[in-house]
Image (cartoon, rainbow, N blue to C red):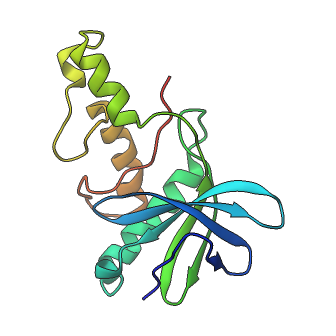
Amino acid sequence: MAVFQIGDVILGKYEVTQVLGQGGMGIVFAARHRELDAPVALKFLLPSLRESPQSAERFAAEARTAMRLKSEHVVRVYDVATVDGAPFIVMEYLTGQDLSKVIAARVAAGDLGSHFQRDRRCPGTHPLARRRFFALASRDAGRAWSTRSAVAARPE
């Protein structure tokens, strides 16, 4: 089981700089690509889900789907890899505010309609955006998907 600390180097090229967060499916680290001297985000499948073939396929499908999405509002996926049995996605590192906090603040201020209210299944995301993402993911996997995974989006 791969557990990383600040300063650890993954695959000889990604130096972990901080833990960004953890969700229902993965944990995300900020890292620096040592050869390119560029920031990246590394999303690892949670250890508790690594033995599940369904979870591993969902994680891989998320990366494939995100790679196909070409939008300035969707984080870019650069690569996928595995270290010590832990699959991970190498993504663009974004700076700024947490999108769910931005939306919550705008809802509280009355800047957004009630259709933007937070949803327990996928906090901080718009229902239409979830449907579009999961329609793509379902098409990739050839079956229905739950709303437990999501692609990070950039605020407008």
Question: Residue 21: x percent and y percent?
Answer: 40, 56
Q: Quadrant of residue 50?
A: bottom left
Q: Is residue 18 left or right of residue 57?
A: right
Q: Is residue 40 left or right of residue 55?
A: right
Residue 61: image location, x then y, percent: 45, 64
Q: Quadrant of residue 108?
A: top left
In the displayed structure, would residue 30 be above or below residue 45? above
In the rendered image, the residue lying farthest to the right is 35
Q: Position of residue 129 (x, y in %)?
A: 36, 35
Q: How many marks?
A: 0
Q: Residue at x 24, y 18 (%)?
A: 107
Residue at the farthest top position: 110
* Viewer-proximal residue among 15 and 50: 15
Residue 82 image point, x, y percent: 56, 81
Report the residue at 64% width, 78% height from top. Answer: 10
- The residue under the point 39% across, 44% down is 133
Name the quadrant of the N terminus: bottom left
User: Does 39 appear above or below 107?
Assistant: below
Q: Nearer the viewer, residue 10 or 81?
A: 10
